[in-house]
Image (spheres, rainbow, N blue to C red):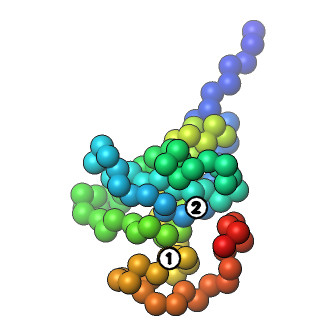
């Protein structure tokens, strides 16, 4: 009897990731984001080709949330494990945005070192 391979979170491994929000203009209006996941997709993949990530919402008052901003760093996992095509965002890492949006908590100079995952 051969063992089948199933790739989903919890069976063959739980793959965590950290990434940066690159696009939040979800054409389907589902609240998804395109995330440049550090060390995963590489520079060869254009931002427009990144898979769409769904954000996990809290169980209390789950219909009310503040959207994430371009440049926010987020942490999450892949629902499809090592296939890496179905990312879920679990939360935002505050204070590490590399983008000055001019509004909100990311306004002004960002007190972090250089981003080790980009050439900029």
Q: Are marks 1 and 2 in contact (CB under 8 Å)?
A: no
- Tell me if mark 1 has few (under 14), some (14-19) or many (20+) residues whose alpha carbon lies within 10 angstroms of its own: some
Q: Which mark is residue 19?
A: 2
Viewport quadrant of the N terminus: top right
> From the viewer's perspective, is 31 left or right of 114?
left
Q: What residue occupies the far top of the structure in this picture?
A: 1
> From the viewer's perspective, is 52 left or right of 40?
left
> From the viewer's perspective, is 62 left or right of 32?
left
> Which of the two residues, 26 or 76, is positioned nearer the viewer here?
26
Q: Which mark is residue 99?
A: 1
Q: Is residue 119 above or below residue 84?
A: below
Horizontal and vertical percent position of residue 12? 67, 36
Q: Residue at x 61, y 42 (%)?
A: 84
Q: Residue at x 52, y 81 (%)?
A: 95
> Distance from label 1 to label 2 (Cα)?
14 Å
Viewport quadrant of the C terminus: bottom right
Mark 1: which secondary structure?
loop
Q: Is residue 50 above or below residue 91?
A: above
Horizontal and vertical percent position of residue 69? 40, 69
Would you say residue 16 is visible in this rendering? yes
> From the viewer's perspective, is 83 left or right of 50?
right
Would you say residue 87 is visible in this rendering? no
Tell me which corner region of the image, top left, top right, bottom left or bottom right, holds residue 55: bottom left
- Tell me if mark 2 has few (under 14), some (14-19) or many (20+) residues whose alpha carbon lies within 10 angstroms of its own: many
Q: Nearer the viewer, mark 1 or mark 2?
A: 1
> Which of the two residues, 109 or 56, is positioned nearer the viewer here?
109
Q: Is residue 100 above or below residue 76?
A: below
> Which of the two residues, 37 or 16, is positioned nearer the viewer here?
37
Q: Residue at x 52, y 44 (%)?
A: 49
Q: Residue at x 42, y 54 (%)?
A: 33
Horizontal and vertical percent position of residue 16? 63, 54
Q: Earlier in the sequence, mark 1 or mark 2?
A: 2
């Amino acid at each position: 009897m051969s063992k089948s391979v199933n790739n989903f979170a919890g069976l063959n491994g739980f793959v965590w990731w950290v990434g940066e929000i690159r696009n939040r203009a979800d054409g389907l209006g589902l609240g998804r984001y395109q995330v440049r996941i550090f060390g995963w997709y590489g520079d060869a993949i254009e931002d427009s080709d990144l898979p769409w990530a769904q954000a996990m919402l809290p169980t209390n008052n789950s219909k009310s949330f503040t959207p994430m901003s371009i440049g926010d760093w987020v942490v999450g996992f892949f629902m499809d494990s090592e296939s890496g095509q179905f990312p879920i965002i679990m939360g935002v890492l505050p204070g590490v945005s590399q983008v000055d949006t001019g509004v909100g908590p990311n306004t002004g100079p960002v007190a972090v070192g250089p981003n080790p995952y980009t050439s900029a």
